[in-house]
Image (cartoon, rainbow, N blue to C red):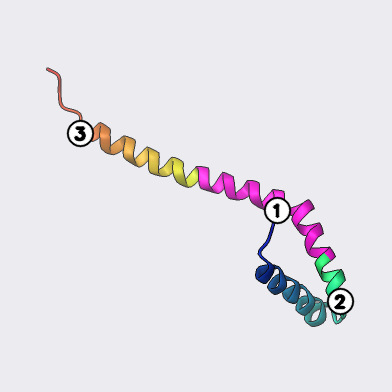
Amino acid sequence: MEIAKEDKADIVEKIKDYFSTELDQDIGQFDAEFLLEFFIKEIGPFFYNQGLFDARAAMQKVVDDVDERLLALELPTQ
């Protein structure tokens, strides 16, 4: 997965800030980038798959709504 250079820089800064604020540790640029790559590779697929699951559920609601509306348009045949 490729991240835009500007986005990557923002995320790396957030990682560094988190370590500093929450863990009272300074983390260097290289370590923060390494950690980001780890998250992308090892944890990213879980979030990606959850996003797909959520998108399917949202799409299914739309399809169900359209189906109900179409059924409501049916005319009696007798």
9 in relation to 63, above or below = below
Q: Which mark is residue 27?
A: 2
First of labels 1, 2 by sequence position: 1
76 in relation to 34, above or below = above
Q: Amino acid at mark 2?
A: Ile
The span from disc 3 to disc 1 (Cα, nearest Å) is: 45 Å
The image quadrant of residue 30 is bottom right
Furthest residue in direction left, as rendered: 78
Pointer 1 local density, CA inside 10 Å: few below 14, some 14–19, many at least 20? few
Q: Main secondary structure of the magenta part?
A: helix
- Of 17 and 5, which appears nearest the observer? 5
The verdict on residue 11 being magenta is no
The span from disc 3 to disc 2 (Cα, nearest Å) is: 62 Å
| Residue at image mark 3 | 73
Q: Position of residue 65 (x, y in %)?
A: 34, 41
Q: Secondary structure at mark 3?
A: loop
First of labels 3, 1 by sequence position: 1
The residue shown at (65%, 50%) is 48
In this rendering, the label closer to the viewer, 3 or 2: 2
- Going by the image, does 28 lie left or right of 5? right
Q: Position of residue 15 (x, y in %)?
A: 77, 73
| Residue at image mark 1 | 1
Q: Position of residue 14 (x, y in %)?
A: 72, 75
Write the start and end of the magenta stretch as one range: 34-56
Q: Position of residue 69 (x, y in %)?
A: 27, 38
The image quadrant of residue 25 is bottom right
The span from disc 1 to disc 2 (Cα, nearest Å) is: 23 Å
The verdict on residue 42 being magenta is yes
Q: Are marks 1 and 2 in contact (CB under 8 Å)?
A: no
12 in relation to 52, above or below = below
- Of 65 and 29, which appears nearest the observer? 29
- Going by the image, does 55 lie left or right of 49? left
